[in-house]
Amino acid sequence: MAPYSGAVNYAYHLDAAKLAARLSHHAVDALGVTHLRDQVVAVDSGSNSDITAVRTRGGERVEGDLFIDCSGHAALLIGDYCGVEWIDRSQVLANDRALVVPVPVADESQIQSQTIGTAHAAG
């Protein structure tokens, strides 16, 4: 069997900030994407209510054909503008949190494939 092709009792964790930076650099350098880092404060819409542009805290108006809401729990586009309500799916999530800390492991074959977290009174 080829390496990494079968069921194993471990998983990989990625550094999300490093991955985002790498994807950003690739998009800008190789694909000609313009990367604007700012906060969306308003939405412009067309006659059919589609989003035609967003306005930023820095005063820019950014037009586009496709907008992806990356505002997290604020849900500025999909929630505030489009009116889509949050649907709680926590009852079906097997893993919904992780605490990442380095822990020495004597036998790497015993590393489990999920993180078990315990909530405490202080969060």
Image (cartoon, grey):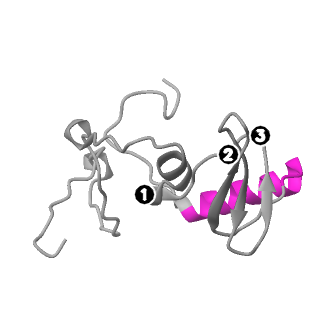
Check disc 3 and give the amino acid type.
Answer: Asp
Q: Residue furthest front?
A: 47
In this view of the protein, which residue sits in the foreground, 57 or 18?
A: 57
At which x and y percent is residue 65? Answer: 77, 40
- Residue type at mark 1 is His
Per the model, the C-alpha gap separating discs 3 and 2 is 7 Å
Work out whether 2 lies above or below 39. above
In the image, residue 21 lies in the stretch drawn in magenta: yes
Q: Are marks 1 and 3 in contact (CB under 8 Å)?
A: no
Where the C terminus falls, by quadrant? bottom left
Which residue extends farthest top?
1
Q: Which residue position holds label 2?
A: 67
**Residue at numbered disc 3:** 65
Secondary structure state at the residue bearing disc 2: loop
Q: Position of residue 86 (x, y in %)?
A: 36, 45
Q: Earlier in the sequence, mark 1 or mark 2?
A: 2
Q: Which residues are magenta?
A: 17-33
Q: Please report contact status of discs 3 and 2: CB closer than 8 Å, yes or no.
A: no
Give the mark nearer the N terminus: 1 vs 3: 3
Measure the alpha-carbon separation of dots 1 and 2.
16 Å
The answer to whether 48 is drawn above or below residue 108 in the figure is above
Whether residue 60 appears in magenta in the rendering, the answer is no
Q: Which residue is mark 1?
A: 73
